[in-house]
Image (cartoon, coloured by chain):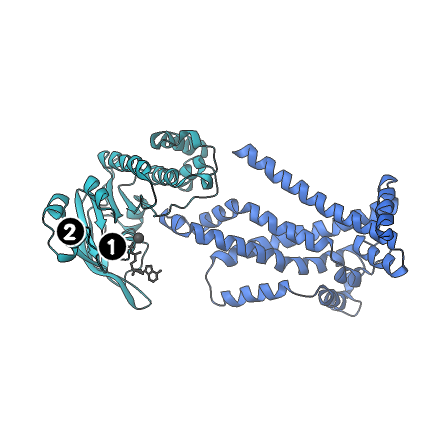
Amino acid sequence: MVTRSILPLTVKKACVTRRGKRLIGPISTTVHRHGLTVVMGPNGAGKTTLLRMLHGMERLAEGHLAWQQPPEQARKRQAFVFQSPIMMRRSVLDNVAYPLMVHGTPRTEARAAAADWLERVGLKESAAKQATVLSGGERQKLAMARALIRKPEILFLDEPCASLDGRATREFEELVCDAFARGTRIVMSTHDLGQARRLAKDIWFINHGHLHEAGPAEAFFASPQTPEARAFINGDIVE
Amino acid sequence: MNDITQGLLEAFRLIISLDRDLIEISLLSLRVTLTAVAIASAIGLPLGCWLAVRRFRHRRLAIATMNALMGLPPVVVGLIVYVLLSRSGPFGVFGLLFTPTAMVIAQVIILTPLIASIAHQAIRELWAEYHDLLISMNTSRRQRITALIWDGRRALLTASLAGFGRGIGEVGAIMIVGGNIDHVTRVLTTAISLETGKGNFALALALGFVLIALAIIVNLIIHSLSKTETSGRW
Ligand SMILES: Nc1ncnc2c1ncn2[C@@H]1O[C@H](COP(=O)(O)OP(=O)(O)O)[C@@H](O)[C@H]1O
Ligand SMILES: [Mg+2]
């Protein structure tokens, strides 16, 4: 079966406001079929809001998003990993099987697929545990398996390593690289410069809700165009 | 102090000797309250869940009303049910006054808001937790509610148990609508009330201990049932 891609996604002058206050925008950009985009910016810059907006979880006050397929189609082929992953009060295995079951895969089949994914992310031993007892790093892995199990075309990751230690971060980054290598389009946010340097193919730099720079990672790190981005890269405090 | 020891001894004696009256009123207590809890749960649990996830006009008002109804004084509920069921009342033709059915009706009215309110609270918290995930996964409203009820089933069970606790110890309403008629509508709480009035403290205390024991046993049974289910699944 050939399914046509939902990408590229075109964003035109999109704004998100809350209680009359503009959180981000207007933002115009394109998310191409292939790539690994890292969204950078200080805390409160609007990274989370931007990712949620792209995923269709924020109502646009202005502008619009255009996928290559109708919205319902597009929605089915995206996945999102939240900054603090939501653990359903079920076993680890059932958490990962849930997205399949909810979309009609028979239970045994869904659980078998979930078991495969748990093995891939290194949580095989924990399959029978309650998800709520997992550590931070394990939760992120679970969230990753749960996000990837339906083979999304695009995966949004919101500061997935913000509360992880070095080793858990490295393991998680391996999963990200693996998904990218298999052709999943990735858009992830971070305020960790090192992580951005390790993973990014493209960088979006945002501050105060505006997209200040967007382009290849190498160029961004070599010669940032805006003073804010330069300060951010130098490790200065950006306000 | 002496009364309490005597009460314990008397309770022990009544239980050992399988006292007919004791068994009869204990069983009626259980029957009335368990029936009321079952009906109140069938109404209250879905209602609580529904109020937690559904947005509609006057939702706040509905929730405030539910919480206010939770504080209804049982005596007043009993009185109202009495008036409704009495000969001259609108439902008088059914002849339900002073029957166990009347007691069940009164208890359902007392327990439903309580069960609905606890269920609402629990499901609302779970919904706040799950919201983004379930929205992101593109679930239908029905699937969301199913997930919340399934994952919140312990909390819902607790809501029903709280209802049972309130119902089994309730005396005001069932005294009025049941009439505490020997061999017909006498239950543990109304019997305790009667024996206390007659000055039979030992017997009253004995019945009190039986009541407490029943409440604990029912809780333990239900909890252990839910535990076996858990360990079987995971
Ligand atoms: N629910 C909300 N209501 C009002 N303001 C919000 C809300 N969520 C976020 N904001 C504001 O929006 C801005 C961007 O937030 P966010 O997207 O979370 O930034 P980041 O993820 O880059 O730290 C911040 O100024 C934040 O205070
Ligand atoms: Mg954020």
- Identify the residue under disc 2: A214
Query: Mark 1 near ligand 1 (CB under 8 Å)?
Result: yes
Give the number of the disc on residue A63. none
Where disc 1 sits, the SS reads loop
In percent of width and height, residue B227 lies at 60, 38
Query: Mark 2 near ligand 1 (CB under 8 Å)?
Result: no
Mark 1 Cα shell of 10 Å, populated few (<14), some (14-19), many (≥20): some
Which mark is nearer the camera, 2 or 1? 1
Looking at this rendering, what residue extends furthest in the bottom direction? Answer: B88
Amino acid type, callout 1? Pro
**Residue, x 48% and y 43% (percent of image)?**
A89
Question: Mark 1 falls within which chain?
Answer: A
Q: A189 left or right of A106? A: left
Name the foreground residue: B157 vs A3. Answer: B157
In percent of width and height, residue B111 lies at 66, 57
Q: A192 left or right of B203? A: left
Where disc 2 sits, the SS reads strand
> Which chain is drawn using cyan?
A
Q: B114 left or right of A197? A: right
- Identify the residue under disc 1: A42
In percent of width and height, residue A73 lies at 29, 46
In percent of width and height, residue B202 lies at 87, 52
**Residue, x 84% and y 55% (percent of image)?**
B191
Mark 2 Cα shell of 10 Å, populated few (<14), some (14-19), many (≥20): some
The CA span between labels 2 and 1 is 16 Å
Residue A114 in view in this figure: yes
Depicted A115 relative to depicted A75: above or below: above
Amino acid type, callout 2? Ala
Q: A68 left or right of B78? A: left
Depicted B71 relative to depicted A7: above or below: below
